[in-house]
Amino acid sequence: MVPSRFVRWSWSDPNLIIPCREQFTEGRTERIFVSISEAIDSPSLEIEAALLKGQGLPGGPRWCFAPGKHPSEDTIYRWIREQIKADGRADFEAEMDKLLLELVRRQEEGMPLPSQHADSPYKATQMPESLLPNLLKMRCMFRIWSCKQLFAHQEGSPALPFDLRLASVQDYLRYLAARRISELERNILPELEKYFSSKEKSSSRSKQEKDTTSAVRPGLDVMRWFLSWQMILIYRQSLGWVLDQQQQTDAAPIPIAVLPMNGERHTRHTFRETTRQLFEAIIVIYSVLFHKKTTVERTRDAAPQVFGDDHLHRAYQRAWGKLPEFYEQVLRQVSPTDELFIEYIVAKESKILAKSRKKK
């Protein structure tokens, strides 16, 4: 199952450098608005930045968070949630993030999830209440951790890419994101293992009652499919991003907050290989859960009543609608890290979805 014993980050290194810590600042501070996109309407995080002493850089003074003015985690979560809502992309990854947002919204409103539908003749082990919220937090932090370029603007000025003057701000945000990802990962992996291994148990309803509610049986498969894909995307994107950084020989050193062990070659290798193992483990789990063509099709074609919410059902269908395009992109890229992914999932499901489109 999910190798929860694997740990990608370690925070006990005595040489660990924490951005913005023990740095002396001048009295001057500025309000800066940070965003992940340079779009004018992109949601922004308001921070109070302080000017560092003794930082005579050619590009200008260096800034960091003002002492005691670091943004709270809740503030960062709200910022990235708004970013997901405003994301104009319509690819598979973006649609899956929006679907996650919808599922968490439904849970926050006290509404049942697809696998908890009251009319289902099958009762599965209840999904831990913290699983979806924690997964959303992990996705939010992942967006910060893996963001290649942050943008900043002050009131009345256009957004500009972060440069050396704001490097400490981005390093600290990445450091905070990495810490939270590592904590959330330790909670999420064992919960996923338990949920993936749970079995549906038939209720005492009559056969006629079960037949009339057969449309809601894919509820458990829907949630397992969704949760599996969330982890596949996180680990695939993590692995690809780290490899991309390491292959850029003329690029700046990998930030300490990305691989928080002073960037030693052995540590980077360990981090990469652990991420690969997690990626491959979730691929194998997915292939076991969805190895049958009928299971894939039943999960894709889950009826609206499975969701109990038309808006949620439409979001689910949009994600599935973008999956063939995502598979085509994976096959075009020919990445060495995707070999198992292609063999176990992409190649097989591409054929299933292609045949289904021809029938329609």
Image: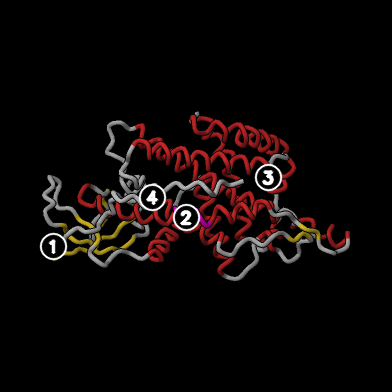
Asked whether, in this view, residue 120 is left or right of residue 45, the answer is right
Are there few (<14), some (14-19), or many (20+) residues within 10 Å of tag 4?
many
Residue at x-position 59% and y-position 53%:
192
Badge 1 element: strand
In this view, the residue in front, 147 or 198, is: 198
Residue topped by disc 2: 138
Q: CA distance from mark 2 to mark 4?
A: 10 Å
Residue topped by disc 4: 145
Instruction: Kindly report the secondary structure that dominates the magenta region of the rendered protein.
Output: helix
In terms of sequence position, does the residue under pointer 3 or pointer 2 come before the other? 2
In terms of sequence position, does the residue under pointer 1 or pointer 4 come before the other? 1
Q: CA distance from mark 1 to mark 3?
A: 57 Å
In this view, the residue in front, 32 or 166, is: 166
Badge 3 element: helix
Q: Which residues are magenta?
A: 182-187
| Quadrant that contains the C terminus | top right
Tell me which amino acid carries mark 3: Leu
Q: CA distance from mark 4 to mark 3?
A: 30 Å
For the residues bearing labels 1 and 2, Cβ distance under 8 angstroms: no
Residue topped by disc 1: 26
Does the stretch in magenta take in 186?
yes
Residue at x-position 42% and y-position 62%:
77
Asked whether, in this view, residue 331 is left or right of residue 71, the answer is right
For the residues bearing labels 1 and 4, Cβ distance under 8 angstroms: no
In the drawing, what numbered circle is on residue 289? 3
**Does the image show residue 198?**
yes
Q: CA distance from mark 1 to mark 4?
A: 28 Å
For the residues bearing labels 3 and 2, Cβ distance under 8 angstroms: no
Tell me which amino acid carries mark 1: Glu
